[in-house]
Image (spheres, helix red, strand yellow):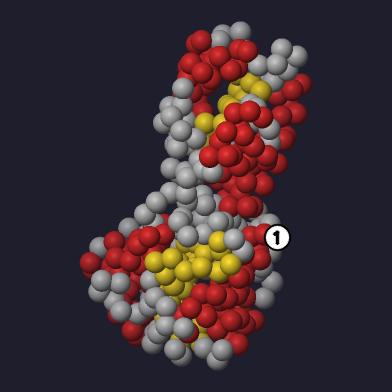
Amino acid sequence: MKTIAVFTSGGDAPGMNACLRAVVRTAAFNGIKVKGILNGYDGMIADNFIDMDASAVANIIHKGGTILKTARSKSFFTKAGQQKAKANLTKNKIDGVVVIGGDGSFKGALEFSKMCKIPFVGCPGTIDNDLVGTDYTIGYDTAINTVIDAVDKIRDTAESHGRVFFVEVMGRDAGLIALRSGLASGAEAILIPEIKTNINALIKKLKSGRKEKKSKIVIVSEHDDAGGAFKISEKIKLALPEIDIRVSVLGHIQRGGKPSCMDRVNASRMGYAAVQALLGGKKHTMIGIVNNKITFTPFAKAVKHLQQPHPDLVQMMEILS
Ligand code: F6P
């Protein structure tokens, strides 16, 4: 293994830069050249490769986003796109690739492996935490801390006005951001796609809550089966017109910001392990951390299932709210 490529792909996540830094510096330590690919798979197709040495990743460990930029590539899922990508990897003499991204990025790598034999190793970078084979994905910890910071602020104004707030958080099809941040911010209700939302039960809950506390927070995961925060709040307004309701959609604020300590350390461990894995002959595998140990999960398995919320957390949410 003389030269490896590294790129970030899909939705950015805080900690991607820390992971990239670890990949580049571990490779340099082992005498391997690194080429960074700009703009994810699109950059692979467009031959957007840059040389990266250890100093190219100085002062980035604390930065959100990704210095390599990212994209959700459509072209990479076409035969023509993949042929160009393969030709560019060959032209740049790439012996192995580290992809930092989420399930879409690993699905792309898996599809590509049918026509290109260059080994790919993945580091899970997504705020959603929705991959099998790791307790935490890079960016999840920062995102949930961003959410609780925002909800704490919303709680102040909700309390002053005696209002009920529906706060919508990201997570695509996974309710893990909603569940954990809802627990941490003491939300009165948490609606997640993994559990069917019962609007009547929610109405009852909002009606029968502690009398002295008029303000309430309902955390809604963006793809809840009953709809987003606006749609659900409309139903509640109709049933409980006496309640003063507001909606706050947190949106992309959840993807930005300085990575937390946990994300920086996990990302560094995963980036380091990814290079070791390539050197050890691994391919089409995602690096994870389970019970504080580095693990390897084939892409095919990592992308197949969503992490289900822990039943204890779900039961606890009901009792504590
Ligand atoms: O996968 C990360 C994520 O932030 C999801 O939580 C969200 O549904 C999606 O990306 C939004 O993607 P985009 O920024 O492309 O609109």
> Where residue 28 sits in the image (x, y, percent)?
58, 86
Q: Is mark 1 within 8 Å of ligand 1?
A: no
Q: Say above or below: 224 vs 123.
A: above
Q: Left of 103 or right of it: where is 177? A: right
Nearest the eye: 35 or 186: 186
Q: Name the residue under label 1.
A: 261
Q: Left of 96 or right of it: where is 153? A: right
Q: Left of 112 or right of it: where is 8? A: right
**Element type at marker 1?**
helix
Could you tell me how many numbered marks the image carries? 1
Q: Is residue 101 among what the camera can see?
A: yes
Query: Which quadrant holds the C terminus?
Result: top right
> Where residue 47 sits in the image (x, y, percent)?
38, 76
Residue occupying the point 52% across, 59% down: 134
Q: Say above or below: 87 vs 306.
A: below
Q: Say above or below: 166 vs 115.
A: above
Q: Is residue 15 among what the camera can see?
A: no
Nearest the eye: 260 or 273: 273
Residue occupying the point 75% across, 29% down: 156
Residue occupying the point 46% across, 33% down: 195
Q: Say above or below: 243 vs 92.
A: above
Q: How crowded is mark 1: few (under 14 residues within 10 Å), some or many (20 or more)?
A: few
Nearest the eye: 288 or 142: 288
Nearest the eye: 101 or 272: 272
Residue occupying the point 62% across, 70% down: 268
Residue sitting farthest toward the top = 242
Query: Which quadrant holds the N terminus?
Result: bottom left
Amino acid at the residue labelled 1: Cys
> Where residue 244 sits in the image (x, y, percent)?
63, 15
> Where residue 175 sits in the image (x, y, percent)?
50, 40
Question: Can you tell which quarter of the image residue 29 is in?
Answer: bottom right
